[in-house]
């Protein structure tokens, strides 16, 4: 009971980066990136919703990825901006746990939706005649719901176990937000079981990466048997954007979490910025710049808005 009361009044201090100049630089960076992330991903969702040509499984999954990315960025960046403006680094223990829960849940949901997108491309290329049957609207909805269920199911036990630990007074987190690894380092309790569960969670998070690899092995083996060079290039162009996003996303995640707990430090803030801000911001650009249909849908969306609000 005493530990629970102690935790309820505990303040966590988010150090971010060390020097004042670096804090100012990151504040400007967040202030620049966050609106672009929101607007870019919202435009993707609106464009897909408004253009009937984009009402298919690939773009349905992309819209859901953008939806998750909006929330993913909103879990951490607004608090970091508010703390800087208010001249504080504090976050309540409850707020810290809430941040951690949604970070884990949304990161897992993101990864499973990316796996669903890889599966969609694999079916489209390896079994084109059965594509509409396999990737039916019901299947797409189930894939998205399943992603959310797994994400939240993976986040809950970590949050519950972390909340049950004892913490000794005010503590400092060497990051912009509360993550499970940082909180485990702060605890006075024995965290061996928590660490084991954390690595089990990493395993759950890694399952989509395995699915993505299997999907693209099937894609490449099919594509390389295509005699037409034009057909090969077309197939690769439909997968290029997704592979770029997967590489960027899992590359930053591995740099952050696929290593011993004791090695986390303040220097990891740069990797964190890539993970929670830059990747969600770049997704709309990656999926739009090389996609003529998406470009046309965005142009159509802007033309509709302009015609409905004439000067």
Image (cartoon, rainbow, N blue to C red):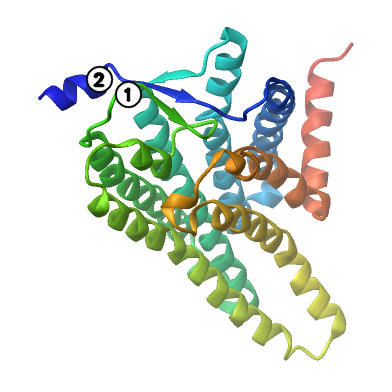
In whole angstroms, how far apart are the C-alphas of marks 2 and 1? 7 Å
Q: Quadrant of residue 42?
A: top right
- Circle 2/circle 1 CB separation < 8 Å: yes
Q: Quadrant of residue 187?
A: top left
- Numbered badge on residue 94: 1
Residue 198 percent across, percent down from the top left: 34, 53
Q: Secondary structure at mark 1?
A: helix
Q: Earlier in the sequence, mark 2 or mark 1?
A: 2
Crowd rating for badge 1 (residues with CA inside 10 Å; few <14, some 14–19, many 20+): some
Residue 286 percent across, percent down from the top left: 75, 50
Taking the spot 25% from the left edge, 20% from the top edge, the residue there is: 8
Residue that mark 2 sits on: 8
Residue 9 percent across, percent down from the top left: 27, 16
Crowd rating for badge 2 (residues with CA inside 10 Å; few <14, some 14–19, many 20+): few
Taking the spot 26% from the left edge, 47% from the top edge, the residue there is: 191
Taking the spot 84% from the left edge, 86% from the top edge, the residue there is: 228
Q: Does residue 264 lie above or below 16 as drawn? A: below
Q: Does residue 240 lie above or below 297 as drawn? A: below
Q: Nearer the viewer, residue 200 or 185?
A: 185
Q: Secondary structure at mark 2?
A: helix
Residue 194 percent across, percent down from the top left: 27, 50
Q: Is residue 296 left or right of residue 90?
A: right
Q: Nearer the viewer, residue 300 or 92?
A: 92
Q: Is residue 104 left or right of residue 310?
A: left
Residue 133 seen in this snapshot: no
Taking the spot 43% from the left edge, 66% from the top edge, the residue there is: 207
Q: Is residue 54 left or right of residue 179?
A: right
- Numbered badge on residue 25: none
Residue 280 seen in this snapshot: yes
Q: Does residue 174 lie above or below 94 as drawn? A: below
Q: Is residue 111 left or right of residue 41?
A: left
């Amino acid at each position: 009971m005493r530990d629970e009361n102690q935790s309820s009044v505990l303040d966590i201090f988010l150090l971010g980066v060390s020097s004042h100049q670096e804090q100012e630089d990151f504040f400007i960076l967040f202030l620049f990136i966050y609106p672009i992330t929101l607007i870019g991903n919202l435009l993707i969702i609106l464009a897909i919703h408004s253009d009937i040509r984009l009402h298919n499984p690939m773009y349905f999954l992309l819209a859901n990825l953008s939806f998750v990315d909006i929330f993913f960025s909103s879990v951490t960046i607004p608090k970091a901006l508010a703390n800087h403006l208010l001249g504080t680094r504090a976050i309540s223990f409850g707020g810290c746990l809430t941040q951690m829960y949604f970070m884990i849940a949304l990161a897992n949901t993101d990864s499973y939706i990316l796996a669903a997108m890889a599966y969609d491309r694999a079916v489209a290329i390896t079994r084109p005649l059965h594509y509409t049957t396999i990737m039916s609207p019901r299947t797409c909805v189930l894939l998205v719901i399943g992603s959310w269920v797994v994400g939240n199911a993976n986040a809950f036990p970590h949050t519950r176990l972390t909340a049950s630990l004892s913490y000794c007074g005010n503590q400092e987190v060497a990051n912009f937000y509360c993550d499970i690894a940082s909180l485990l380092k702060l605890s006075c309790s024995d965290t061996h079981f928590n660490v084991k569960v954390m690595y089990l969670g990493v395993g759950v998070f890694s399952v989509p990466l395995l699915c993505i690899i299997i999907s693209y092995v099937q894609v490449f083996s099919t594509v390389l048997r295509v005699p037409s060079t034009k057909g090969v290039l077309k197939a690769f162009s439909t997968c290029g954007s997704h592979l770029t996003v997967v590489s960027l996303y899992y590359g930053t995640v591995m740099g952050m979490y696929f290593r011993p707990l004791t090695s986390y430090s303040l220097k990891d803030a740069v990797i964190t910025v890539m993970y929670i801000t830059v990747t969600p911001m770049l997704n709309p650009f990656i999926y739009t710049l090389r996609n003529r249909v998406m470009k046309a849908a965005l142009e159509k969306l802007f033309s509709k808005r302009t015609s409905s609000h004439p000067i």
